[in-house]
Image (tube, grey):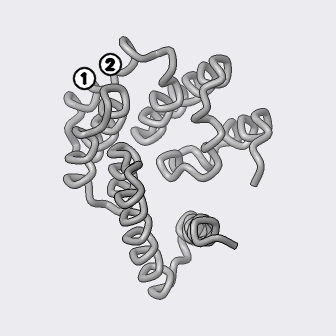
Amino acid sequence: MTERTSLLAQLKRRNIIRMCGKAPDSAKRKSARLMRILVDQLKQRGVFRAHEFGCLELEQGRTEQALAHFHKAGAAFSEAGVAMAEYTLGHERESQAALGELESKYAVGFSYQIAQAHAWRGERDAAFEWFERAYAQRDAGVTRMRGDPMLAPLRDAPRYAALVRKLNIPD
């Protein structure tokens, strides 16, 4: 097993533990260590993506840091991240403005990110509507649904399970 494969397997296990809400202190320490390793690898390989790093920060509850990274992301990714972070900060107007910009300019090609932002904001109906659009557009983002921590608010919805089955996304 390569180092990268091992890291991805460990991250998947961490996500399973986190989603179940049964993360012992040792798992939390390991999660922080894995995140540092992942960030170092992304930086070293020159494929650092501000949006994904922002999502990691947001997932860890570091919203201000996430927002800073989202502002560095490419236009559509930036709007998606800003919509999630501003919502988390309680800035509904700023969040809605970013989401509105995302929907009006990038409805084709970024449907998954639009759905992701709606999911993070707890807007289930809108999220599933945009996931259906993403599916129809063959948006590659849908392949990441099963492990995407930004979709945690949807995981208990029967429509989520049905959509994952429809997409035939492997475990």
- The type of residue carrying mark 2 is Gly
Residue 96 vertical placement versus 3 (above, below): above
Q: Is residue 117 left or right of residue 24?
A: left
Q: Residues within 10 Å of mark 1 (few under 14, many from 20)?
A: some
Residue 1: image quadrant is bottom right
Q: Nearer the viewer, residue 115 or 66?
A: 66
Residue 168: image quadrant is top right
- The type of residue carrying mark 1 is Ala
Which residue sits at x=37%, y=66%?
Answer: 40
Q: Residues within 10 Å of mark 2 (few under 14, many from 20)?
A: some
- Give percent across and percent down for residue 110: 48, 24
Q: Is residue 102 left or right of residue 119?
A: left
Q: Nearer the viewer, residue 54 or 72?
A: 72
Residue 91: image quadrant is top left
Kind of element beneath mark 2 = helix
- Give percent across and percent down for residue 33: 41, 77
Which residue sits at x=57%, y=35%?
Answer: 141
Residue sitting farthest toward the bottom: 26
In the picture of the structure, the residue carrying the numbered disc 2 is 100
Which residue sits at x=26%, y=47%?
Answer: 69
Residue 155 vertical placement versus 86 (above, below): below
Kind of element beneath mark 1 = helix
Q: Are marks 1 and 2 in contact (CB under 8 Å)?
A: yes
- Give percent across and percent down for residue 44: 37, 61
In the picture of the structure, the residue carrying the numbered disc 1 is 97
